[in-house]
Structure formats: C-alpha cells, structure tokens
Image (cartoon, coloured by chain):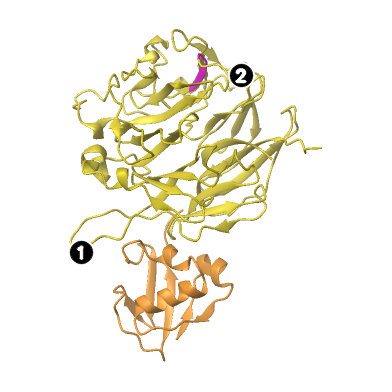
Chain colours: A yellow, B orange
C-alpha cells in the first residue's frame, strides 16, 4: 500500500532552511532543525514528478551561489556539480556575475529531470539532469535587447534585480512564461529560444515611460492549474489578470478598497477554480513601506476573477503588526478545502486550512523568511 | 603547496590544511576543485575573479591576479573577509 504523505512546508530563510510537517488534518505543525544553518536560502521546491527530490537554492554572504539536491525528501543534500553561472566573458565584452539563483521551477511532466532557475541578476538557466548541471538559456540571457529589458543593475530591487515566476504550460513543454523585476513579463513558445513581451495594460510608476520594459516590475505571476490560459499577477503597480490568447492585462486591483490599494508581493491561485486567488496587500503609499496597511494584516480574496474582493483577517493581530511578506513567501496546497500559508520577514509562518477564512500562527522566531512552498513529505 | 582553508569551506575539505599543485594561483585553485569538487566556484566567479569577500594570501602578501606565479615552498592562505550580519 502506498504511504500516505503529510502536508509540509519548505521554508527558505536568510539564515537557512526549515521544513514544517503536519498531521494530515493540518492541525498540528512541527518545525525541523535548521538545514544549512547560516546559508542564505532563496527557494526550496519539491519535484511533483518525483516527490523524493527537493532542490534548494543557496549562497552565503561570502561564498558563491549554488544548488543543493536532496533525493530522500530533505534528509541528505548534495551540491550540484555545475550550478547555474553565466558564460565566461569574451575578451572586451561585458557580462554578468551570478549573485544567486532566486527561483526554481520543475520542468514539464513529460520531461523528468528538467528544471528551470531564474537568477539575480536576471537570467534563466535549465537543468536536464535533475539539478546536477545547469546551462544558460541563451535565447533570453544573450538576447540583443537584454540591457533594454532589464536596465542597469542599480535599477534593480533592493535585494538585486531578479528573474522570477518561471511558468511551464502543463499542455506544452515549449510554452514558457517568465517575469523580471525589472523587465516585464515575457513568453516563449519555443522552449526559451525566442521571447515576446507581454506588458500591455500593466501600469508603471507615474512619470516613467511605459513603453520601456525596464520600468515594468511584475512581483509575482501565477498560472491557474485548472485553466492554463488564465494568469494572475501582483505587480509593483497593481493586481492584474490576463486571459490568453488575449495580450492585455486587466487591472483587477481597481476593485480593491481604496484605503487598501493593490500593492503587494505574493499572488496565490486556487488549484481547481480559476476565479479564485489571494493577495496579501502591503502599504504602497508615499515611500512604499511595504508593510501591513495601518498595522492591520489582511489577506484579500476574489471568487469572481477580480470583480470584487473580500477581506480575510480572522486570527491575525487586530493592530500594531507591521508585516512584510515577500513574493515567494505565500503558497496554497492542493487539498480540499485549500490550505494557505505565508511567512513574514519577522520569521512567523501563518496557515489557514479553510481557504483563508481563519488563520493561525504555526511557527515563530524563525529568521527572515524569503520563501514558503507546499510539499508532501 | 600547503593551503589553509577557512571555516565556510570546510564542508568541502573536512580539514584546515590541504595540499594542492600548480605553478600559478589559478592552477592551484583548479587543483583544489579537482580534489574537492565545487569549492572553486564558491571562491571564484564565472569570469575567474576572486569573489568580493574572499581573500588569498601567500604568507603575508595578498593575491588578486589568478596568473600570479607561486612559490610552492610557501603557504597559501584562503581567508574569508569579515562582513555581513
């Protein structure tokens, strides 16, 4: 008889990784000892094609970036033989130095062992051997308009400019989306050889030229598993939905309450209902504090694809809580009802097992949380 | 030649003192990578530059150029710069 696996969370923090495991009812959670304590953990992701495998993107403050691979559900880790790196510069040519791999995405179900990594500075890398060795996706990294897309390094986000939200269409292994902060959203129909920008309808900070890709700052893009033609996006400038083959993003965040606005980092979608998603609004006023608005944390959900939004804050502190939640630090599981999870930069992990109606803290006193991903361990 | 390893890299070598062969700094670092796979990229970027927070000393003299010719009777000290928080 197959072993029934338990819900788990893979938590990446600025000082190492942690695994939270639960009973099947998702009532009781236990936090593991730190994994690679002191390493800067950017992202841990379980392989849905082979759930024994977890990839872990890491660096330290002093050492170069690397990838660790576990083939036994996170017990033992082995470093990649050839982690992502930009090609060596030809004499007289300028190129990039990889600071870290920021985002990990498993490849298509038909391609076991294929993984993608988005990096800082912006770059896309592919592994075809389960994360052991990585090659640059030249169609993007060496694109002649690369510098026009990404702008200068100093234009990047405070933790460095980054490529994120690598999405593989479950219907077509050649169909990819990526997003870049900054650099906009891009689509490839040929496995990364060529790219087309998808930024129509996306707003930019007032005063910047919207026709320049480097001023576009998508924070997180998600594809609906139940409808791969539907994308949701949390952007620096609003919340959006795009229904393909359409090419114009609709700013569904305009339906958010005016006093809340539609700034934030993460975006989470329902696994079975393409009309449902969740965001975690943060203060985008004045100097962009990016904390819970008025110190009152809330999640907002739509159940009609963005026509209206409902506040979900049962269980959160009623006041004086100044949370920041990063773009990779919110996720949903595939159970029914959907479990939702997020981690704060203050080191707390919060969970809801009723699709956001009520919340409780399941871990605290962790280091600054960078990413939270659901797993079954 | 004798090479001393800083604590962040002991996961690779398991000991402070190791030996490596090579006429230049680049060759010695590549020999270390042959013995301890992966260690070089943690110290040297993809353009063969020593990373910002790593330092290499030949006894008391700091080295930055990978082409530096080494005297194998001396000791190469790989040091992690103090920084961060």
- Kindly indicate whether the residue at mark 2 contacts the one at mark 1 (C-beta within 8 angstroms): no
Q: Chain of mark 2?
A: A
> Residue at 44% across / 63% down in the picture?
B42
Residue occupied by mark 2: A355
Q: Is residue A230 above or below residue A118?
A: above
Main SS type for the magenta part?
A: strand
- Which residue reaches farthest right? A1
Determine the CA span between mark 1 and mark 2. 55 Å
Residue A359 in picture, x, y percent from top left: 63, 22
Q: Is residue A251 magenta?
A: no
Q: Quadrant of residue A248?
A: top left
Residue occupied by mark 1: A91
Q: Check disc 1: other Cα within 10 Å, few if <14, some if 14-19, many if 20+.
A: few
- Which residue reaches farthest bottom? B73
The residue nearer to you, when weighing A103 against A107, is A107
Q: Can you see residue A291?
A: no
Residue A18 in picture, x, y percent from top left: 62, 45
Q: Is residue A267 above or below residue B30?
A: above
Quarter of the image with the C terminus of chain A in it: top right
| Secondary structure at numbered mark 2 | loop
Q: Quadrant of residue B29?
A: bottom left
> Residue at 52% across / 13% down in the picture?
A311
Q: Earlier in the sequence, mark 1 or mark 2?
A: 1
> Residue at 63% across / 51% down in the picture?
A71
> Residue at 46% across / 26% down in the picture?
A223
* Tags 1 and 2 both on a single chain: yes
Q: Is residue A212 above or below residue A274?
A: below
Q: Can you see residue A330?
A: yes
Answer left or right for A107 relative to A211.
right
Answer left or right for B50 relative to A79.
left
> What stretch of residues is rendered in magenta?
A275-279
Q: Quadrant of residue A76?
A: bottom right
């Amino acid at each position: 008889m197959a072993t029934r696996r338990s819900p788990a969370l893979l938590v990446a923090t600025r000082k190492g990784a942690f695994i939270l495991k639960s009973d099947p009812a998702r009532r009781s959670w236990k936090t593991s000892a730190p994994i690679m304590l002191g390493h800067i953990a950017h992202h841990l992701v379980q392989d849905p094609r082979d759930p024994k495998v977890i990839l872990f993107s890491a660096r330290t403050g002093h050492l170069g970036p690397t990838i660790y691979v576990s083939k036994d559900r996170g017990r033992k880790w082995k470093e990649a033989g050839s982690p992502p790196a930009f090609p060596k510069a030809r004499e007289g040519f300028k190129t990039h130095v990889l600071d870290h791999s920021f985002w990990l995405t498993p490849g298509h179900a038909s391609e076991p062992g294929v993984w993608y990594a988005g990096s800082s500075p912006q770059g896309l890398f592919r592994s075809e051997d389960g994360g052991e060795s990585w090659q640059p996706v030249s169609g993007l990294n060496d694109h002649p308009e690369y510098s026009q897309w990404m702008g200068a390094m100093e234009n990047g986000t405070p933790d460095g400019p980054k490529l994120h939200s690598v999405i593989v269409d479950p219907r077509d292994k050649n169909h990819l989306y990526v997003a870049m902060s900054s650099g906009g959203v891009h689509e490839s129909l040929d496995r990364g050889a060529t790219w087309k920008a998808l930024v129509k309808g996306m707003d930019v900070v007032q005063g910047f030229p919207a026709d320049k890709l480097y001023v576009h700052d998508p924070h997180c893009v998600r594809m609906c598993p139940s409808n791969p033609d539907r994308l949701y996006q949390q952007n620096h400038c609003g919340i959006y939905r795009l229904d393909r083959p359409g090419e114009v993003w609709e700013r569904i965040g305009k339906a958010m309450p005016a006093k809340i606005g539609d700034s934030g980092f993460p975006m989470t979608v329902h696994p079975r209902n393409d009309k449902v998603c969740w965001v975690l609004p943060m203060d985008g006023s004045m100097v962009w504090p990016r904390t819970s608005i008025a110190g009152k944390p809330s999640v907002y959900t739509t159940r009609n694809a963005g026509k209206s939004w409902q506040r979900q804050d049962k269980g959160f502190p009623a006041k004086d809580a100044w949370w920041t939640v990063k773009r990779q630090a919110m996720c949903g599981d595939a159970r029914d009802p959907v479990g939702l999870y997020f981690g704060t930069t203050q080191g707390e992990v919060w969970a809801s097992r009723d699709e956001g109606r009520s919340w409780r803290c399941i871990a605290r006193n962790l280091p600054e949380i960078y990413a939270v991903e659901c797993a079954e361990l | 030649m004798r090479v001393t390893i800083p604590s962040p890299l002991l996961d690779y070598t398991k000991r402070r003192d190791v030996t490596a062969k090579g006429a230049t700094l680049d060759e010695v670092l590549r020999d270390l990578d042959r013995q301890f796979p992966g260690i070089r990229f943690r110290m040297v970027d993809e353009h063969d530059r020593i990373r910002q927070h790593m330092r290499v000393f030949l006894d008391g003299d700091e080295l930055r150029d990978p082409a530096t010719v080494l005297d194998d009777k001396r000791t190469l000290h790989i040091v992690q710069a103090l920084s961060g928080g």
